[in-house]
């Protein structure tokens, strides 16, 4: 029908639509009837397309709880989460997580650790292998496919964690204090490599939510910082970051010290 052909373009608001939308989220941990712990209350958060957002808050403020809920790994007590307009109910396929403690399987090689997420998704073995090798290469672990986690440095282990997250081609990457178990120089290298991949459009993801308690890291890494309160956790302020120079360049001299 002609009126559909001539329909006006989608409203501009569509491009502003949040990729991840968290509304009125509340979470209590049941600790026995008298002393339930209210960890998150009235959390509002929007992650838009093509941005890195830091969630900056103290230890124990409920940041990991919030990420687990966004990833669909546990249900919230109340509130709603949508990813690309779809309500999250159960483990969300569009989301991958990177953990502070890497969460690798010590009895599996690098290649198997990266492939394992694809196995759960029912991807055929040949395709799994191909995608895992590509992710390992992308993240700079070429040549370490057969190594075991215990043979790797902390920085390399977290690269495996990143490859394992990227291999599923998530839309959203949730990073839970991904650099805080690493020494300062290693963390700096990994941060910069990540920003390079992001800046060059080489990571198959749309947006990153980075949880941190490191203010400098939040400033260096993100387009916006959401400041999170404690007791209960809630987004209380938003800071837009505008750096005077591009953020994704590591001084070559610095890299020599690290490598
Ligand atoms: P953060 O990541 O900001 O450090 P968490 O989400 O890990 O915060 O924890 C927030 C609060 O919830 C803390 O007081 C913690 O002890 C408590 N908590 C976390 N996980 C559980 C759980 N599975 N059961 C009960 N309490 C928990
Ligand atoms: Mg945490």
Image (tube, grey):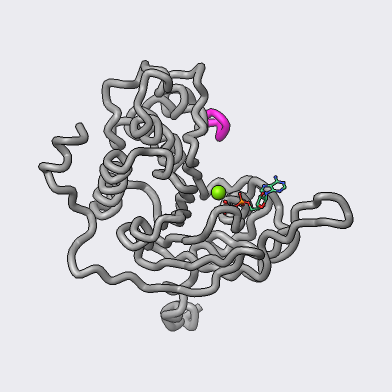
Q: How many marks?
A: 0
Rendered residue at 68%/53% (across/down):
89
Q: Quadrant of the C terminus?
A: top left
When the figure is inspected, residue 68 is found, relative to residue 238, above or below; the finding is: above
When the figure is inspected, residue 201 is found, relative to residue 187, above or below; the finding is: below
Q: Is residue 141 visible?
A: yes
Rendered residue at 28%/51% (across/down):
195
Magenta: main secondary structure equals loop
> Which of 148/126 is in front?
148
**Image coords of residue 73 (percent x, y):** 64, 46
Rendered residue at 46%/48% (across/down):
177
Rendered residue at 33%/63% (across/down):
219
Lateral position of residue 244 relative to residue 167, left or right:
left
Lateral position of residue 181 relative to residue 20, left or right:
left
**Image coords of residue 17 (percent x, y):** 48, 71
Residue reaching furthest left?
A: 253
Part of the protein shown in magenta: 119-123
When the figure is inspected, residue 81 is found, relative to residue 97, above or below; the finding is: below
**Image coords of residue 229 (percent x, y):** 57, 67
**Image coords of residue 46 (percent x, y):** 51, 68
Q: Is-magenta flag for residue 213?
A: no
When the figure is inspected, residue 92 is found, relative to residue 222, above or below; the finding is: above
Q: Is residue 50 visible?
A: no
Q: In the figure, residue 256 lies in which quadrant?
A: top left
Lateral position of residue 179 relative to residue 252, left or right:
right
């Amino acid at each position: 029908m002609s009126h559909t052909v001539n329909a006006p373009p989608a409203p501009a608001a569509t491009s502003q639509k949040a990729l991840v939308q968290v509304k009125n989220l509340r979470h209590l941990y049941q600790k026995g009837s008298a002393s339930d712990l209210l960890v998150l209350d009235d959390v509002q958060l929007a992650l838009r397309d093509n941005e890195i957002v830091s969630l900056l808050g103290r230890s124990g403020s409920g940041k990991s709880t919030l990420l687990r809920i966004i990833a669909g790994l546990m249900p919230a007590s109340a509130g709603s989460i949508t990813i690309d307009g779809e309500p999250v109910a159960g483990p969300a396929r569009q989301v991958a997580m990177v953990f502070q403690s890497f969460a690798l399987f010590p009895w599996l090689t690098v290649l198997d650790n990266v492939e394992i997420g694809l196995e759960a998704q029912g991807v055929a073995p040949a395709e799994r292998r191909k995608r895992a090798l590509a992710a390992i290469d992308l993240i700079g672990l070429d040549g370490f496919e057969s190594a075991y986690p215990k043979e790797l440095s902390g920085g390399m282990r977290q690269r495996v964690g990143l490859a394992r997250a990227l291999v599923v081609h998530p839309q959203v990457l949730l990073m839970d204090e991904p650099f805080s178990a690493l020494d300062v120089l290693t963390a700096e290298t990994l941060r910069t490599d990540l920003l390079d991949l992001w800046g060059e459009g080489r990571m198959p993801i749309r947006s990153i939510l980075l949880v941190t308690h490191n203010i400098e890291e939040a400033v260096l890494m993100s387009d916006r910082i959401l400041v999170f309160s404690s007791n209960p956790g809630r987004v209380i302020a938003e800071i837009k970051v505008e750096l005077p120079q591009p953020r994704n360049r590591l001084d070559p001299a610095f890299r020599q010290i690290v490598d």
